Image: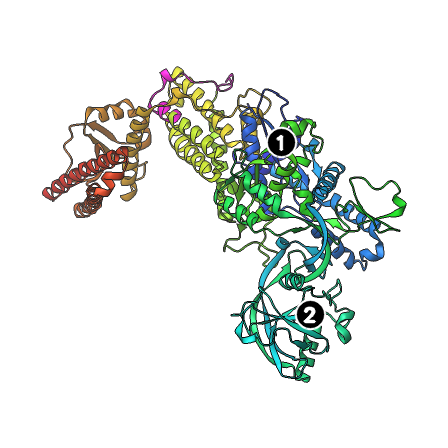
């Protein structure tokens, strides 16, 4: 046993502990082949920067699950790793180089990629130090990176197989283009926000000089790529002009008027300009009518040679110039300001440009259909909360083909080569043998392409004989924020099913977002972000983990609240003080906790072990259901209220007494309960529980590998539960009266307790020492036959009345008023219960036990009401 400081100090508790766990190899799987495997792969953080509170929440849940399962005897693997995060990391490094007056094109690909690897190494080190500070029990011997050789092999295998199956293709389509990063984006890398814009109404003259049609557009700079104007099929207004030609303003090129299903006759003028190279809907129209595709922009968002005199202008400057020229030449009818939803790049923030481009795509329909079909089988993934399965299905049912190529240098380069002489394309896992005759496709794959393989590529796939793959895949739980469901979760599911024919994880558990105290999303622009490492420095990792887990209701957002963190620290300090008291009151030769003898229990013992049993059962149930917030409340109530406020105080009677045998039993019980509490808490609070467990008599090298508590049938004690509830109600009633009349425990007062029956009298007389210890009476009277004093404070509870004679402290009229208020409250409860039991619908449909419980409550209220009325009469007679 070790001496403990009088106050909990997280720095002292946590310092050096993580390294000791690593030195003991406690984070690695047990290697017990008889044990059930349980695995979680960490959602790999991007090597773009430091971890934020969302990462801390994510990993605190994962580590809690791993520690919990480890203590339950599972062979656990918590696999660490990081994501290369192509666009995000390249953007960070390019921004850093710009400050140094450099750019990647001047450096060349090889030198630039080396700079990014240096960045990766720096931030990977920071992230690992943060994992340590959070206490994550990760097996670093299995750490992976999405660009390491093993994962690169998996990426190449997947790409080539999908290509050979016809599920990856190369084609010219409208994609989302980021002009700043100069790369394609997938749909979910585009954030839509409301921008100020305008509808520009423009005259498109008929080629025969017979007038004009009115066209409205929000992007007049794209008109150089117009190749038609379309009307809806059967629109009577325009049936006579279909087939005629128009003159494209500022250009002079003739374009036809066509009919197409795309046009909504109710929207605007019912006439739409068609620009196949700059709008996804127009692209489809162009395909149906064999229209030319004219790209009018360069990669950087400037206008190209197809824009004529506007060549080289920025797209938005071009818009202004075009509008001005349309006005000068009489083509501009009007400008109508609007606010409309416009796509912006998630990474650079610039307005995305829909643009014709040759890219690599994944054909999503077959993969999505297989994922949806799987949800109808026993191999389905359980979504927690269940509502996110609907989100997943909606995404799968409405998914578009996935553009996977990115015009970047950092990432998995596409395994396709083009023959320098013939132009022939070769796709393979390895480069062509005569490599000097081939050029590899310069593009890299979307980051999510490799991340989608994470659960199985990290286990050694495509080597299906890999020990880890055979042992730990599929994984048991994926824990992540709901905002990443379409980006990552959905992709892991369809790739996992396609390549391993298994679900990648059994459960997909979603938490929400951490918002600031005002409920706003944390962001750099608002300056309201919180560094979890700063929180740990102030309150400790255990307090942060407790706050995060206690705020966890699956799928729900939570708010960062420093007051709750202070409360978390205070709770740990309460545990610390309780443990310190128990340890200080143990004999020098105290042995590790062992099962107590229930035959020797008194009321307090029977009650606390029954409460412990209930807490153990509930925490296990709630952990298994991922209800960590509810589990936290169970733990808090048991530890703070039941153990600290009641049982320890009751145990002091024996610890301060002369009965050595009784004292020894209490010491054994205290050490057992403390041991169980620390084990229950360990998955959430690893540091302080380890410190306290090693400071008391223990059996084993670490609480981390101690057995998690189990419920014991012999601890169930309904009688103790009932009797202790009665005893506590009596004590609380007296304390409330003392508070009302400002009579502290140090003051000397008489206490009279009148019982309805001998059974209740026995409860109090058998535990009179506890009653006296908690109430400090001058004289204590416990009986079924008590003449109530005329002037007294009265409390009426189920089965008893408490009188405290207070002739010098209480005004009779005030006491009558108080009792009349109590009478009114009890009458309301009786009326409510009577009405409920008189409701035929309730009586007909409610379970019998519910009806019986309501009847019992009504009888109890009626008994209390009668006692209050009698007391009021007695007081009035004595006035």
Res. 537 image quadrant: top right
The reply, left or right, for residue 675 in relation to residue 128 is left
- The answer to whether any part of residue 630 appears in the image is yes
User: Residue 228, how many percent across, how many down?
Assistant: 66, 70
Of tags 2 and 1, the one toward the viewer is: 2
- Please name the residue shown 69% across and 35% down the image: 143
User: Residue 189, how many percent across, how many down?
Assistant: 64, 54
Q: Is residue 879 magenta?
A: no
From the viewer's perspective, is residue 716 above or below residue 387?
Answer: above
Res. 792 image quadrant: top left
The reply, left or right, for residue 778 in relation to residue 547 is left
Q: Secondary structure at mark 1?
A: loop
- The answer to whether any part of residue 4 appears in the image is no
Near-viewer residue (748 or 286): 286
Near-viewer residue (157 or 57): 157
Figure quadrant of the C terminus = top left
The reply, left or right, for residue 710 in relation to residue 153 is left
Q: Which residue is mark 2?
A: 227
Label ID, residue 517: none
Res. 607 image quadrant: top left
Figure quadrant of the N terminus = top right
Near-viewer residue (724 or 416): 416
Give the total of numbered labels: 2
Label ID, residue 473: 1
**Label 1 environment density (alpha carbons within 10 Å; few <14, some 14–19, many ≥20):** many
User: Residue 2, how many percent across, how many down?
Assistant: 56, 25
The reply, left or right, for residue 654 in relation to residue 854 is right
From the viewer's perspective, is residue 765 above or below residue 18?
Answer: above
- Please name the residue shown 47% across and 40% down the image: 629
How much space separates mark 2 and mark 1, taking CA atoms? Answer: 53 Å
Bounds of the magenta segment: 587-609
User: Residue 865, how many percent across, how many down?
Assistant: 18, 40
């Amino acid at each position: 046993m070790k001496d403990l400081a009088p106050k909990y100090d997280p720095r002292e508790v946590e310092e050096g502990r993580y390294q000791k766990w690593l030195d003991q190899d406690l984070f690695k799987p047990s290697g017990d082949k008889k044990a059930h495997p349980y695995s979680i792969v960490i959602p790999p953080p991007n090597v773009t920067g430091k971890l934020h509170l969302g990462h801390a929440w994510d990993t605190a849940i994962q580590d809690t699950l791993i520690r919990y399962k480890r203590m339950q005897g599972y062979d656990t693997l918590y696999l660490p790793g990081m994501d290369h995060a192509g666009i995000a990391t390249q953007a960070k490094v390019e921004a850093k180089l710009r400050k140094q007056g450099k750019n990647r094109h001047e450096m060349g690909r090889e030198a630039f990629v080396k700079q990014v690897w240096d960045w990766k190494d720096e931030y990977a080190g920071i992230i690992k130090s943060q994992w340590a500070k959070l206490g994550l029990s990760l097996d670093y011997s299995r750490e992976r990176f999405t660009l390491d050789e093993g994962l690169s092999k998996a990426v190449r295998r997947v790409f080539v197989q999908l290509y050979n199956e016809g599920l990856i293709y190369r084609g010219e389509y409208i994609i989302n283009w980021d002009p700043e990063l100069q790369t394609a984006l997938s749909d979910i890398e585009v954030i839509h926000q409301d921008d100020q814009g305008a509808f520009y109404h423009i005259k498109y003259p008929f080629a025969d000089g017979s007038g004009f049609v009115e066209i409205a557009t929000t992007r007049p700079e794209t008109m150089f790529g117009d190749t038609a104007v379309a009307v809806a099929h059967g629109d009577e207004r325009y049936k006579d002009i279909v087939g005629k030609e128009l003159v494209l303003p500022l250009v002079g090129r003739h374009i036809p008027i066509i009919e197409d299903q795309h046009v909504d006759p109710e929207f605007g003028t019912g006439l739409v300009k068609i620009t196949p190279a700059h709008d996804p809907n127009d692209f489809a129209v162009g395909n149906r009518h064999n229209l030319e595709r004219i790209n009018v922009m360069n990669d950087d968002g400037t206008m190209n040679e197809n824009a004529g005199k506007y060549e080289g202008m920025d797209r938005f400057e071009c818009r202004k110039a075009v509008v001005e020229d349309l006005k000068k030449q009489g083509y501009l009818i009007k400008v109508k300001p609007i606010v409309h939803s416009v796509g912006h790049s998630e990474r650079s923030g610039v307005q995305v440009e829909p643009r014709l481009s040759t890219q690599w795509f994944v054909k999503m329909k077959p993969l999505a259909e297989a994922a949806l079909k799987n949800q109808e089988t026993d191999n389905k993934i359980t979504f927690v909360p269940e509502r996110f399965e609907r989100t997943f299905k909606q995404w799968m049912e409405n998914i578009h083909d996935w553009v996977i190529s990115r015009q970047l240098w950092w990432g998995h380069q596409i395994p396709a080569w083009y023959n320098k002489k013939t132009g022939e394309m070769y796709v393979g896992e390895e480069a062509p043998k005569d490599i000097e005759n081939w050029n590899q496709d310069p593009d890299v794959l979307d980051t999510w392409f490799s991340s989608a393989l994470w659960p199985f590529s990290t286990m050694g796939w495509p080597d299906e004989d890999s020990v880890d793959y055979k042992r730990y895949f599929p994984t048991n739980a994926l824990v992540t924020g709901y905002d990443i469901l379409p980006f990552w979760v959905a992709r892991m599911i369809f790739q996992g099913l396609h390549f391993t024919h298994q679900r990648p994880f059994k459960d997909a558990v979603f938490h929400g977002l951490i918002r600031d105290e005002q409920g706003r999303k944390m962001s750099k622009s608002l300056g309201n972000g919180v560094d979890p490492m700063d929180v740990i420095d102030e309150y400790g990792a255990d307090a942060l983990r407790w706050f995060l887990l206690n705020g966890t209701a699956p799928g729900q957002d939570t708010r960062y609240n420093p007051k709750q963190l202070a409360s978390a620290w205070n709770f740990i300090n309460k545990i610390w003080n309780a443990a310190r008291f128990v340890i200080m009151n143990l004999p020098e030769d105290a042995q590790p906790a062992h099962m107590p003898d229930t035959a020797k229990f008194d009321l307090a013992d029977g009650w606390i072990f029954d409460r412990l049993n209930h807490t153990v059962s509930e925490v296990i149930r709630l952990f298994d259901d991922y209800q960590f917030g509810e589990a936290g409340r169970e733990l808090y109530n048991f530890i703070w209220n039941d153990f600290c406020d009641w049982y320890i105080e009751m145990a002091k009677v024996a610890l301060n007494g002369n009965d050595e045998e009784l004292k020894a039993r209490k010491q054994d019980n205290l050490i057992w309960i403390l041991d169980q509490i620390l084990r229950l808490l360990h998955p959430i609070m690893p540091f302080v529980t380890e410190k306290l467990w090693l400071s008391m008599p223990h059996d084993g090298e670490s609480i981390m590998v101690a057995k998690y508590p189990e419920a014991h049938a012999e601890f169930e004690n309904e009688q103790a539960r009932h009797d202790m509830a009665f005893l506590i109600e009596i004590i609380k009633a007296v304390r409330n009266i003392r508070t009302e009349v400002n009579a502290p425990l140090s003051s000397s007062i008489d206490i009279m307790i009148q019982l309805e029956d001998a059974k209740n009298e026995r409860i109090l007389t058998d535990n009179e020492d506890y009653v006296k210890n908690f109430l400090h009476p001058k004289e204590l009277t416990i009986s079924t036959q008590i003449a109530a004093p005329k002037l007294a404070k009265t409390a009426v509870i189920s089965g008893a009345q408490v009188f405290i004679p207070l002739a010098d402290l209480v005004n009779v009229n005030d006491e009558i008023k108080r009792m009349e208020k109590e009478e009114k409250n009890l009458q309301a409860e009786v009326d409510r219960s009577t009405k409920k039991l008189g409701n035929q619908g309730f009586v007909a449909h409610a379970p019998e036990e519910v009806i019986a419980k309501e009847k019992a409550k009504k009888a109890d209220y009626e008994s209390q009401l009668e006692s209050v009325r009698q007391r009021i009469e007695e007081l009035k007679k004595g006035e």
